[in-house]
Image (cartoon, grey):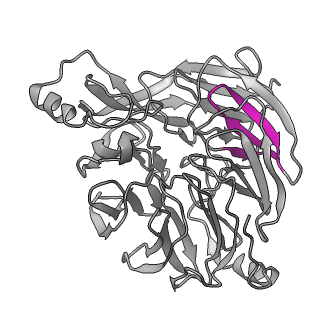
Amino acid sequence: MNIKRLFPIFLLFAFASNSVTSAQDGSSNWPNWRGPNFNGVAEPTDPPEEFGESKNLKWKAAIPGLGNSTPIIWEDQLIVLTAVPTDKEPGKEEEALQEGRRMGPPSNGTDQIHQFTVISYNKNNGEINWQTVVKEELPIERTHELGTWASNSPVTDGKHIYAYFGSRGLFCLDFEGNVLWERDWGQMEKKMSFGEGSSPALYKNRIAVLWDHEGDSFITVLDTKTGKDVWKKDREEATSWSTPLILEVNGRVQVITSATSRTRSYDLETGEIIWEGTGMTGNVIPHPVYENGILYLMSGYRGNALQAIDLLRAKGNITGTDAILWEYNQDTPYTPSPVLKDGYLYFLRVNNGFLTCLDAKTGEVKYSKEKVEGISSLFSSPTWADGKLYIAGKESVAVVKAGPEFEQISENKLDDTFHASPVIIGNDLFLRGQKSLYCFSKKQ
């Protein structure tokens, strides 16, 4: 462990709490995969602590095809992205393109043409409102054995749905399922054929897409009305899967990207780099989180890295400066993103069920590597609701008490496998499995 305190923090937090604002707010909607404030927190809520195939189940609906993307919710519509295989034969050109990418480690390739589909469910009863096929083609890349061709999560501003399928493109739809515009940046070449997964980030009339891969990496910000570039910047980065975080800091909106070579903050309107720094491991995936003016970055592939950064001091190259308040370099996640709530930072170790809780201001360890029963491996991220953490693993969904002392409340087994993160609205818990979409709610 390496924790360094650089200056009294309590004065900083009193000032910073009024200086950094989120891009969105609201408790009745879930507009992106990490919730209204991008930190995995749902409130006010009262979902069930125990649930199952015959317990507190409000409804269950089948999902065609396969996808790991987390659903979003706006009012009564729950939006899911999926890739549905067809029985159509690929053409010779498609077969040749795919064959050229059959190198690398074991991963699940395909010889089937897929329909890349956006589905709207009624969140109250699970009935399908509409489904739109935005593209039909043969995926020529391979993906991780647990991955899918629909692992990027959509976002919404309440006016439109922005459905991102990576190498298939970005599609803007209205809430009737009509495609209004689309963008296609070609084919990604992800490291080790691990597949795609970064999601777009939305702020007012701007949407940011991060395109880090083994080719020419870049970040672009688009106008949400037209889909046209506001700006595009090349990046000296290899593959990453982290989703950008957009924050307003002292009246200036920043697009923050966490990656292996450098963490960078771009001005949302111009693309100018505001600050940058090193310190993450390879294959960065976890989504950054912030609270009270402090940004938290972490990664956990072949190493461990966690940095707490004062956004009010972050300018230029912050490596080794007092903009980094403290570091904690053990037990950090590879795939799952952290949860930040009420001054506590929660995260899972690598891709397994060992949970750590730190004091977010100081980095003080409240507990570390506590075993969450029923969770042996996972690729989703926890969600906080009503003073509890909901953790969806491959085998079951666990509920753990939030706060500085570890206590597991329940272990809930279902007839499915989960790689998408829990979504919670009011009293309803939504889980996207490999086969089905679930809604659990306390029986009245």
Q: Is residue 2 above or below residue 416?
A: below
Q: How many marks?
A: 0
- Of residues 2 and 214, the one nearer the viewer is 2
Image quadrant occupied by the N terminus: bottom right
Query: Residue at 35% across / 47% down in the picture?
Result: 190
The secondary structure that dominates the magenta segment is: strand
Q: Is residue 158 above or below residue 408?
A: below
Q: Is residue 332 above or below residue 416?
A: below
Question: Is 420 positioned to the left or the right of 140 in the image?
Answer: right
- Does residue 400 belong to the magenta stretch? yes
Image quadrant occupied by the C terminus: top right
Query: Residue at 18% across / 18% down in the picture?
Result: 89
- Does residue 412 belong to the magenta stretch? no
> Can the viewer see residue 394?
yes
- Of residues 231 and 407, the one nearer the viewer is 407
> Can the viewer see residue 170?
no
Range of magenta residues: 382-402
x and y percentages locating residue 106 in the rendered image: 39, 31
x and y percentages locating residue 367 in the rendered image: 84, 53
Question: Is 170 positioned to the left or the right of 313 in the image?
Answer: left
x and y percentages locating residue 205 in the rendered image: 41, 63
Q: Quadrant of residue 4?
A: bottom right
Query: Residue at 29% across / 26% down in the picture?
Result: 114
Q: Is residue 78 above or below residue 282?
A: above
- Of residues 95 and 305, the one nearer the viewer is 305
Residue placed farthest to the left in the image? 92
x and y percentages locating residue 256 in the rendered image: 50, 68
Q: Quadrant of residue 7?
A: bottom right
Query: Residue at 58% across / 60% down in the picture?
Result: 288
